[in-house]
Image (cartoon, grey):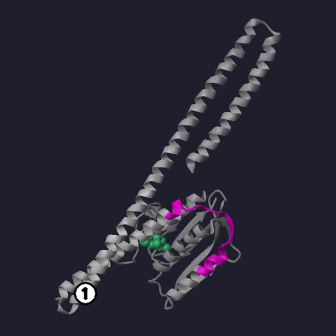
Amino acid sequence: MIERRRRRRLHIITHVVVALGLLLVAAAGRFAYRSSAAARIPVVIGVLLLATSHILMTRELYRLENMERELHDANRELESFSYSVSHDLRAPLRSIDGFSQALIEDAGLTLVPEARSHLDRIRAATQRMGRLIDDLIGLSRVTRSGMTFERIDVTDLVEQIVAELRRQTPDRVIDVLIRPGMTATGDPHLVRLAFQNLIENAWKFTSRRPHATIDVGESRDKDGVPAFYVGDNGAGFDPEYADKLFGAFQRLHTSAEFPGTGIGLATVQRIVHRHGGHLWAEGETNQGACFYFTLE
Ligand SMILES: Nc1ncnc2c1ncn2[C@@H]1O[C@H](COP(=O)(O)OP(=O)(O)O)[C@@H](O)[C@H]1O
Ligand SMILES: [Mg+2]
């Protein structure tokens, strides 16, 4: 994204420089035509300067374009590699889980408790790895899927996500504040996935609060660009590591404290970047967290 912006800026600068150079040459040529031979020197210098700057800028543009193409190809290869690896890992994993279960069913009564506990742990570990693979496949799908840009009723979308979470966890008592009338332009499926990940995190990291509150609303970034936010009064995190949270597998809480695979925020980051936006997080240990993102 940054490369693309930089390239566009360079294109504009090149055209402006060439246009100014042409004006200069035209003006100087007209002047030189009417004056002595000595006055033609500025014309020659002008032409040389114009030609040199044009060559330099064009070279820089080609270099950047090549770099971006190479990066894009390398990324694509990496994506399809991780996608097929994830798919191929599923079959042996299903086998391990299936045979462990078969062993428990066939020999469960004859197994000593310790052996039974080992088998349970094998099954728990394979299931955890299965979740990890599913999340990884989801992450690479986010990069590979095509995008359609539509007007989205964000308030309605957030209400649907919250209603589903309430259905799944009827014992949780959570006050959810959703700003009315929120809209956005983006890919409906991806924007839903981004909100879903952020709201599910808020749901999870407030699970130890007797009075949990979640707030979904609109704000602005430091340049005044409209942003959405999902805030909560949950476990929070050490603000020193706020930038680390968006990398795949980066977690600031242990699985024993809060279960998870550490792919959710990496997924949100990819979605936001694909829309040309950016995201950031604010939080304090034990004082809640707030995640912001723009879509442009
Ligand atoms: N609402 C939140 N409150 C506190 N910490 C959070 C919140 N959301 C995310 N985090 C931190 O960021 C990490 C990465 O989040 P995520 O990628 O969604 O992974 P997961 O939910 O599987 O742990 C979490 O493990 C947690 O440490
Ligand atoms: Mg998560």
**Image position of 138 (left or right of 255):** right
- Residue 14: where, in percent of width, then height? 66, 34
Q: Quadrant of the C terminus?
A: bottom right
- Magenta span includes 143: yes
**Image position of 72 (left or right of 260):** right
Query: Which of these two is toward me, 3 or 174?
Result: 3
Residue at the image point whose x is 52% and y is 40% from the top: 66
Q: Tell me the magenta residue range.
A: 141-160
Find disc 1 in the rendering and name its residue: 104
Query: Which of these two is toward me, 201 or 117?
Result: 117
- Determine which quarter of the picture holds residue 114: bottom left
- Residue 282: where, in percent of width, then height? 52, 67
Q: Name the residue furthest top.
A: 37
Residue at the image point whose x is 54% and y is 74% from the top: 196
- Residue 191: where, in percent of width, then height? 60, 68
Query: Which of these two is toward me, 220 or 137?
Result: 137
Residue at the image point whose x is 56% and y is 34% from the top: 60
Name the secondary structure under disc 1. helix
Q: Is residue 284 visible?
A: no
Number of numbered discs present? 1
Q: Is residue 66 visible?
A: yes
